[in-house]
Amino acid sequence: DGNKVPPSVLFGLILALTIGLLFHSVFGRRLWQLPLFLVSAIVGVFAGQVIAVFAGWEFFRLGNVAIIGSSAGALLLLAVCWFFTAPLQPSRQQLKRRMRGAIEGNEQASA
């Protein structure tokens, strides 16, 4: 009986994986971001749970899991992870240079 996973831990993992997958489906741009988002969501859910327990938040609990605190922790860490892993957008000047280069390259190829 000592090898069983407690239901609250299992529900926390399911909640974290669901939030991480949904976040990646909305904000993810690269496949390599998926494992980072999943790990961030798992750590965030359990960190949010710990904070909710120590803060004494009793609203919207499902069993022993504080849904609001856990979800907030996951979303906070996912936002931090997204900030550091999102690809940088090129500036307008870089885009103009690329377009000029592509146009000049097409003109030279057709000549």
Image (cartoon, grey):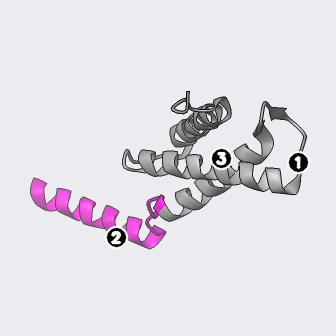
The reply, left or right, for residue 93 in relation to residue 50 is: left
Horizontal and vertical percent position of residue 74: 65, 49
Q: Quadrant of the N terminus?
A: top right
Q: Please, what is the three-letter code of the amino acid marked with disc 2?
A: Arg
Q: Quadrant of the C terminus?
A: bottom left
* Residue at (58% x, 37% y) in the render: 13
Residue 60 percent coordinates (x, y): 86, 35
Q: What residue range appears in magenta?
A: 85-111
Q: CA distance from mark 2 to mark 3?
A: 44 Å
Amino acid, disc 3? Val
Main SS type for the magenta part?
Answer: helix
- Measure how far apart labels 1 and 2 are at the Cα level: 54 Å
Give the label on residue 57, or none.
1
Q: Which mark is residue 97?
A: 2
Which residue is nearer to you in this view: 99 or 33?
A: 33
Q: Is residue 108 magenta?
A: yes
Residue at horizontal 65 percent and vertical 47 percent from the top:
45
Q: Residues within 10 Å of mark 1 (few under 14, many from 20)?
A: some
Q: Earlier in the sequence, mark 3 or mark 1?
A: 3
Residue position for label 3:
45
Would you say the residues marked 1 and 2 are in contact, meaning their CB atoms lie under 8 Å apart? no
Counting from the top left corner in percent of width and height, residue 21 is at 53, 37
How many labels, in total? 3
Q: Is residue 42 left or right of residue 62?
A: left
Category of crowding for the residue at label 3, using alpha-carbon neighbours closer than 10 angstroms: few (below 14), some (14–19), many (at least 20): many
Residue appearing at x 73%, y 48% in the figure: 49
Q: Nearer the viewer, residue 40 or 82?
A: 40
**Residue sitting at x 65%, y 29%:** 7
Residue 71, quarter of picture: top right
Image height of 35 relative to 96, above or below: above
Q: Given the image, on which type of amino acid does mark 1 rest?
A: Trp
Q: Quadrant of residue 106?
A: bottom left
